[in-house]
Image (cartoon, rainbow, N blue to C red):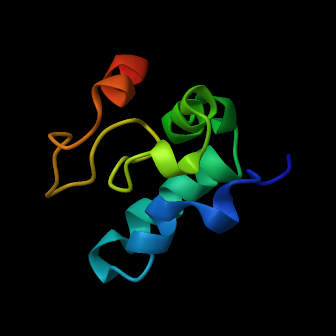
Amino acid sequence: MEDCKNLANCSFFKKYEQEEWLHDALKGYVNLYCKGKKQDHCIRKKVSKVLGGPEHVPVNMKPNGQPIIGTTDADWSDEVKKIIS
């Protein structure tokens, strides 16, 4: 299976890749959602497709559609929240 074409430019991974406390979790997300069998289940990819580009995906949204630990979805647009509900 090919890697997700969005991986190299994914704002989520770019922002959090240097966070030591997230290293294992990010590795797991990459293995499942970016290089593995859940590529078609990535909520970030879905939001990007529906709203017309990755710039519409909240940076703190994990591939499963949940906000990263220590953050909330309070500043996510209503459009994003509707897509993931």
Please, is residue 24 above or below residue 81 in the view?
below
**Left-right relation of 40 to 3:** left
Report the residue at 40% width, 47% height from top: 62
Residue 36 or residue 8, whichever sits in front: 8
Quadrant of the drawing holding the C terminus: top left
**Left-right relation of 6 to 29:** right
Residue 42 or residue 36, whichever sits in front: 42
Please, is residue 58 above or below residue 74 in the view?
below
Residue 34, percent from left and from top: 65, 51
Report the residue at 73% width, 50% height from top: 4
Residue 36, percent from left and from top: 69, 45
Residue 58 or residue 31, whichever sits in front: 58
Residue 41, percent from left and from top: 59, 29
**Left-right relation of 53 to 72:** right
Report the residue at 51% width, 32% height from top: 47
Residue 45, percent from left and from top: 59, 38
Please, is residue 73 above or below residue 71 in the view?
above
Outermost residue toward the right? Answer: 1
Number of labelled discs? 0
Residue 58 or residue 24, whichever sits in front: 58
Q: State the image quarter where residue 31 is shown.
A: bottom right
Report the residue at 61% width, 35% height from top: 52
